[in-house]
């Protein structure tokens, strides 16, 4: 996972565990307790490494969404390393964000903003915030207090839900910003994160971006945090002070666009007006010949005297939206020139991006 630098060279990286401690608290709500913890350069905080990093205190702020109202804020000594706030939240949608403060109270480090919800949790549950790692580093930093951020995403063009997110293997969605010159999208900085099923992220009215011009991506992550899909904005985003910035909607496609046609073939077992269909072996068919035709009888694909099978799949490289027909012949094993089975199956319609399936019943004629 890519990380990001703070205003004064400190980076806050999110992991996923929590501990407990005490500090100054602004409390609201009563249904859910909150715990959180942090590290400094990947290690447990001490007076020494906090001082070396220039961090005196660590502050976490939880805001109600979509109002942006602060409902919980807590400040602890950096060396404490953790907090346990007790019952301070009600049911609702929230964002959390961490800040590192120097001895004078100035912000010297800021984390990305993460969205979370308590609506599916039973009252009395604990909300465990992601562990934050304050890392000293330099370089590109899009985080700041100039502009707010909004983003939305879809699953196969539909509103995300627990069902379609689970089916797609997407647990969370990450938003990253890149330098305008980073056209390879190689060094992104995470600025926000939300659950897949939430379908959106919104920091407004809280500003979390530094003014500037950026490339952006919205990334789909599985439960392990691995990237399983990414949508890159086709144009640069100009962040301006005092404005909200809406990214283009990302559509995570799990069904590959394009058309295909599956034709299951069944064979008559007797000569006569009544169809009694069966598979190749039961009907005694050894080889088959077929011709798939499109509009006006145009030949799309054909094969002659191939081993009899359960059917034929015509891939997207052959199929476009339209109506198809298929002429099929069958012969017993060892006698490919004697066609005992014949039929033309018609009316096989394929719509845009459809994976169509039909059955073709082939008459025994002798």
Image (cartoon, rainbow, N blue to C red):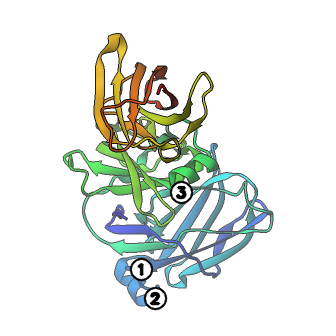
Element type at mark 2: loop
C-alpha distance separating marks 2 and 1: 8 Å
Numbered tag placed on residue 171 in the rendering: 3
Q: Earlier in the sequence, mark 1 or mark 3?
A: 1
**Drawn side of residue 346 relative to residue 21, left or right:** left
Is there any visible trace of residue 343 in the rendered image?
yes
Is mark 2 in CB contact (under 8 Å) with mark 1? yes
Place of residue 164 in the rendered image (x, y in percent of width and height, measured from the top left): 58, 46
Estimate the spatial distance between the alpha carbons at disc 3 and disc 2, rounded to whole Å: 34 Å
Residue closest to the eye, 18 or 172: 172
Whole-percent x, y for residue 8 in the image: 33, 65
Q: Secondary structure at mark 3?
A: loop
Q: Which mark is residue 317?
A: none
Mark number, residue 46:
2
* Percent coordinates x, y for residue 178 in the rendering: 29, 50
Q: Nearer the viewer, residue 36 or 167?
A: 167
Residue 234 quadrant: top left
Quarter of the picture containing the N terminus is bottom left
44 is higher (above) or lower (below) than 298:
below
Q: Which residue is rendered at x = 36% and y = 74% of the image?
A: 135
Q: Are marks 3 and 2 in contact (CB under 8 Å)?
A: no
Q: How many marks?
A: 3
Q: Picture quarter containing residue 10?
A: bottom left
Question: What whole-number distance in Å separates the C-alpha atoms at marks 1 and 3?
Answer: 27 Å
The residue identified by callout 1 is 40
Residue 320 percent across, percent down from the top left: 36, 24
Name which residue lies at 35% across and 30% down: 290
Q: Residues within 10 Å of mark 2 (few under 14, many from 20)?
A: some
Name the front one of labels 1 and 3: 3
Instruction: Say which label, 3 or 2, has the lower sequence index.
Output: 2
Relative vertical location of residue 178 with respect to residue 222 in this rendering, above or below: above
């Amino acid at each position: 996972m890519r990380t990001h630098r703070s205003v004064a060279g400190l980076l806050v990286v999110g992991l996923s565990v929590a501990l407990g401690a005490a500090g100054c608290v602004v409390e609201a709500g009563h249904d859910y307790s909150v715990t959180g913890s942090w590290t400094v350069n990947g290690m447990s905080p001490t007076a020494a490494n906090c001082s070396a990093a220039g961090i005196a205190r660590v502050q976490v702020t939880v805001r109600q969404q979509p109002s942006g109202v602060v409902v919980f804020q807590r400040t602890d000594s950096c060396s404490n390393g953790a907090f346990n706030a007790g019952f301070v939240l009600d049911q609702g949608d929230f964002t959390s964000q961490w800040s590192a403060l120097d001895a004078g109270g100035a912000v010297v480090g800021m984390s990305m903003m993460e969205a979370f919800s308590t609506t599916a949790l039973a009252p009395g549950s604990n909300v465990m915030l992601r562990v934050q790692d304050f890392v000293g580093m330099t370089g590109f930093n899009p985080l700041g207090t100039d502009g707010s951020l909004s983003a939305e995403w879809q699953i196969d063009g539909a509103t995300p839900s627990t069902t379609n997110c689970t089916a797609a293997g997407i647990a969370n969605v990450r938003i990253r910003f890149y330098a305008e010159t980073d056209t390879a999208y190689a060094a992104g900085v995470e600025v926000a994160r939300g659950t897949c099923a939430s379908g959106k992220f919104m920091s407004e009215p809280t500003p979390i971006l530094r003014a500037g011009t950026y490339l952006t991506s919205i990334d789909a992550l599985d439960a392990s945090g691995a990237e399983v899909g990414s949508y890159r904005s086709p144009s640069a985003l100009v962040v301006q002070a005092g404005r909200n910035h809406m990214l283009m909607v990302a559509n995570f496609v799990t069904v590959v666009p394009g058309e295909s046609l599956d034709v299951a073939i069944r064979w008559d077992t007797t000569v006569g007006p009544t169809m009694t269909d069966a598979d190749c072996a039961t009907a005694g068919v050894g080889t088959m010949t077929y011709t798939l035709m499109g509009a006006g009888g145009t030949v799309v694909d054909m094969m002659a005297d191939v081993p009899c099978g359960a059917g034929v799949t015509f891939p997207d490289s052959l199929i476009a939206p339209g109506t198809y027909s298929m002429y099929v012949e069958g012969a017993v094993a060892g006698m490919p020139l004697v066609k005992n089975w014949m039929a033309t199956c018609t009316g096989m319609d394929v719509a845009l991006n459809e994976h169509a399936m039909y059955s073709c019943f082939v008459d025994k004629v002798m």
